[in-house]
Amino acid sequence: AQSVAQPEDQVNVAEGNPLTVKCTYSVSGNPYLFWYVQYPNRGLQFLLKYITGDNLVKGSYGFEAEFNKSQTSFHLKKPSALVSDSALYFCAVRVRNAGNMLTFGGGTRLMVKP
Amino acid sequence: DTAVSQTPKYLVTQMGNDKSIKCEQNLGHDTMYWYKQDSKKFLKIMFSYNNKELIINETVPNRFSPKSPDKAHLNLHINSLELGDSAVYFCASSQETGSNTGELFFGEGSRLTVL
């Protein structure tokens, strides 16, 4: 069985400071890892993904994430947070196959204060 | 053009009623999904269809029945609605064959409230 853990329900950061949203995963096989963002009353928007190759992946809105196989982690980062980054962030994992579903973590609410 | 569209966006109904939520994707994807997001924002897969064929059916009451008339549509019908069915239901799609890496594209959600 595959699973994702996001250990922080909420992350608070001041505007302009760097942010990190943590994610660890458990999966049999090579993982495909994703980050999604959800703004209030909206659907999930794809931010970035790790499939293979370079462990540091860059995505939308200046976000990046680092795949760490030994720690089974895929933390989301941004060098300088914006108030508009405040939203709910979901980490997700799957093994690529039509019969394998995308499993989400519980979500982390990011609050960026001016 | 909206890539994955769901209707209705909001649905308020009484216990015991039957309701449907429709989903359409214009991305040409071969796989569609229904996810349920509860009040704590936890996302859980309900169903997945690949080229109109059911491939994932998680532990969901029989009152929930998905129907895929073609690979661009996946509708969700719910019989005998219960209070616990209140949630936001998200439709999603992905391309599972070829060089695509299988990220999901989500609709805006359908908020179901059962009174």
Image (tube, grey):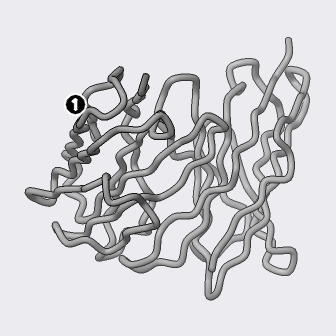
- What residue is shown at x 21% (from left), y 52% (from top)? B74
Name the residue carrying label 1: B1
Residue B92 picture location, percent across and down: 36, 50
In the displayed structure, B21 sits above or below B91; it is above
**Residue B70 occupies quadrant:** bottom left
In the displayed structure, B59 sits above or below B65; it is below
Pointer 1 indicates a residue of which chain?
B
Residue B113 picture location, percent across and down: 43, 25
Amino acid at dot 1: Asp
In the displayed structure, A114 sits above or below B65; it is above
- What residue is shown at x 86% (from left), y 35% (from top)? A11
Task: Classify residue B18 as left or right of residue A28.
Answer: left
**Residue B48 occupies quadrant:** bottom left
- What residue is shown at x 60% (from left), y 39% (from top)? A37
Quarter of the picture containing the C terminus of chain B is top left
Q: Which class describes the residues within 10 Å of circle 1: few (<14), some (14-19), or many (20+)? A: few
SS for dot 1 = loop
> What is the residue that sits farthest to the front in this orientation?
B16
Task: Classify residue B56 as left or right of residue A110.
Answer: left
- What residue is shown at x 51% (from left), y 46% (from top)? A46
Quarter of the picture containing the N terminus of chain B is top left
Residue B87 picture location, percent across and down: 49, 35
Residue A69 picture location, percent across and down: 79, 78
**Residue A111 occupies quadrant:** top right
The tally of labels here is 1
> What is the residue that sits farthest to the bottom in this orientation?
A29
> What is the residue that sits farthest to the top in this orientation?
A114
